[in-house]
Amino acid sequence: MAFGIALSGIDAAQSDLNVTANNIANSATTGFKSSSAEFSELFAVSPQGVSSTQTGNGVKLAKVAQTFSQGNISSTGNSLDLALSGDGMFVVSEAGATQYTRAGSFSTDHNGYVVNSTGQRLQVFQATPTGTFNTTSLSDLQLVTGDSAPNASTTAQMIFNLPANAAVPAAVPFNPTDSNTYNQSTSLTLYDSLGAAHTASIYMVKNAAANTWSAYQFVDGNAVNAAPVTLTYSNAGILTGVVDAAGGTNTAAVNFGPYTPTTGAAVMTPTFNLGKTTQYGSNFSVTSVMQDGYTTGKLSGISVDSTGVVQANYTNGRSTPLGQVAIAAFANQQGLQQVGNTNWVQTFASGSALYGPAGASGFGLIQSGSLEASNVDITAQLVNMITAQRNFQANAQMISTQNQVTQAIINIRG
């Protein structure tokens, strides 16, 4: 009987060594989680119960348990390298088969899908037209490579100060090529519906009537308003009235008139917010120029924030959300089954996956441009190796001792 008990001990020690060897071999594997061998006693039990003098029958490998502790996170500089800081796992899929991993080393395939080293596609919550994400279903993350559509300028805001002590120009009539016919000028860039840029110049002429100015707009050197827009300021320097090309009086929606681009784009009729312009005793100064249009954009890069929102960034300054990385959590993470390639699949013991965004309750945060290293502690594994080796040798010595006892018994009988 001692032979069998010692053999079970040798098998257990060998299993312990195998687990330790696997941990050490994967000490540099991204997202790898170390394992530990757990053993249980073998005991013969009869229907009548166990005798008080019954000895054990040895040991068996009960379970290879996973250690899901956090691995060190190191920077890589690649925006598609993702590291989870905290609980949860990335979700990957291939041909409808879903698996889970902590290895966040991703790249793109020839179709623009974000995949891991084995071609499995990263799963995300799809972006909706309203700017939110559909958290009820998962989809493959695909990076778009097309241009970002332009947006025509519809509104603009200018904040400037006109000098209250400015003199009425002596030269008349107004001529944009003759600086003697106007007091001040400024310009901004507007965009048409095709994304083409146009330079809009505003010329300010002090009127003979106190606290009033005439404003003219030219786009690409072409006059927009034949009749000037009249701006009236109070004796405190605040804009109080406006009469624009359309007969409007709204200081926040001044209309200089329509302009038809030569590019074939739609007619441009942006309104200007001049409500914050002033007429003080200081020099002419422009403090703010803004407008809501932008040109066509080329894809300049991909970014992922800490909550997993994937953004396509374009050269026109625009960003488009492509999806939000889905994170999976389990009631019993130890119940997951390893399937290789640093992946796991859910089992009945683990429970069904609970999906959510990074940063939500029970889910860790994502670090883009980083990877989570293996959580293997080499020093601890070397100590385990020594312990398992000692156990192996002790059980081998037990077999040797039992052999000597058996041999002695045989010699007595002889």
Image (spheres, helix red, strand yellow):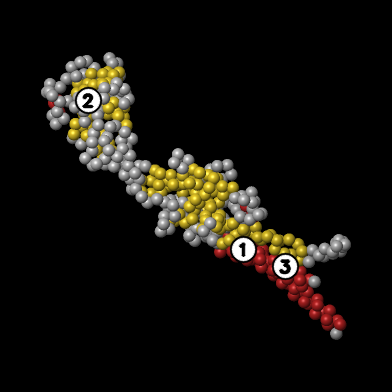
Q: Residue furthest left?
A: 171
Picture quarter containing residue 338?
A: bottom right
Q: Residue at x 37, y 51 (%)?
A: 145
Query: Counting residues from the N terminus, which is met first, the one under dot 2 or under dot 1?
Result: 1
Residue 348 location in percent, x, y?
Answer: 65, 54
Q: CA distance from mark 2 to mark 1?
A: 81 Å
Q: How busy is the neighbourhood of tag 3: few (under 14 within 10 Å), some, or many (20 plus)?
A: many
Residue beneath disc 1: 20
Q: CA distance from mark 1 to mark 3?
A: 16 Å
Picture quarter containing residue 37?
A: bottom right
Q: How busy is the neighbourhood of tag 1: few (under 14 within 10 Å), some, or many (20 plus)?
A: many
- Left or right position of 399 against 302: right
- Left or right position of 361 against 189: right
Identify residue type, mark 1: Thr
Query: Counting residues from the N terminus, which is met first, the one under dot 1 or under dot 3?
Result: 3
Query: Counting residues from the N terminus, which is met first, the one under dot 2 or under dot 3?
Result: 3
Discs 2/1, front = 2
State which quarter of the image contains the C terminus: bottom right
Identify residue type, mark 2: Ala
Residue beneath disc 3: 9
Residue 120 location in percent, x, y?
Answer: 50, 58
Residue beneath disc 2: 215
Q: How busy is the neighbourhood of tag 2: few (under 14 within 10 Å), some, or many (20 plus)?
A: many
- Left or right position of 314 against 105: left
Picture quarter containing residue 61?
A: bottom right
Q: Is residue 105 above or below residue 239?
A: below
Q: Nearer the viewer, residue 261 or 412?
A: 261
Residue 291 location in percent, x, y?
Answer: 31, 34
